[in-house]
Image: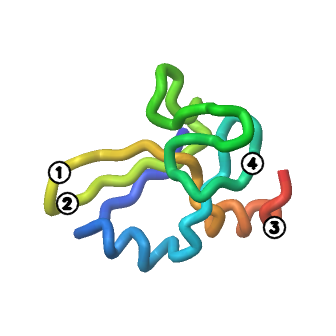
Amino acid sequence: MCKQDEFNSERDFFKKYPSRFYICSNCGYMNPSKYTCQKCGWRADGLFKTMDRGYRYKILTTGKEYEIFKPIELEKGENNGIK
């Protein structure tokens, strides 16, 4: 299951994950986009989303919830960013 956090704003999200790089849940490629893989074209907001291998978060001020590719900062702790 995806990890889920809550943030007061998008700014707080980027303070926690400053690299702005994300790991595609389909092929493992590192992308600058939270939603679209440049290598395989997989979409984190598409039909199958991240297949429970991504990251979910909620912005408290807007009440919106997002499912995105996993931030690279989380991947580093698991296996040094290597798939």
Q: Residues within 10 Å of mark 2 (few under 14, many from 20)?
A: few
In the image, taking residue 31 as reference, residue 8 lies left or right, namely left
Give the label, 4 or 3, closer to the camera. Answer: 4
Residue at the disc numbered 1 = 63
Distance Cα–Cα, label 1 vs label 3:
33 Å
In the image, taking residue 18 as reference, residue 7 lies left or right, namely left
Distance Cα–Cα, label 1 vs label 2:
5 Å
Amino acid marked by disc 4: Tyr
Give x and y (percent) for residue 75.
69, 60
Mark 4 touches mark 3? (CB < 8 Å):
no
Distance Cα–Cα, label 2 vs label 4:
30 Å
**Of all residues shown, which one is farthest toward the front?**
38
**Of all residues shown, which one is farthest toward the right?**
82
Q: Secondary structure at mark 1?
A: loop
Sequence-wise, the earlier of marks 4 and 3 is 4
In the image, taking residue 35 as reference, residue 81 lies left or right, namely right
Q: Which mark is residue 29?
A: 4
Amino acid marked by disc 3: Asn
In the image, taking residue 33 as reference, residue 45 lies left or right, namely left
Distance Cα–Cα, label 4 vs label 1:
30 Å
Q: For residue 52, what is the image quadrant?
A: top right
Q: Secondary structure at mark 2?
A: loop
Q: Secondary structure at mark 4?
A: loop
Sequence-wise, the earlier of marks 1 and 3 is 1
Q: Which mark is residue 60?
A: 2
Give x and y (percent) for residue 27.
76, 38
Amino acid marked by disc 2: Leu
Q: Is residue 64 above or below residue 5?
A: above
Residue at the disc numbered 3 = 80
Sequence-wise, the earlier of marks 4 and 1 is 4
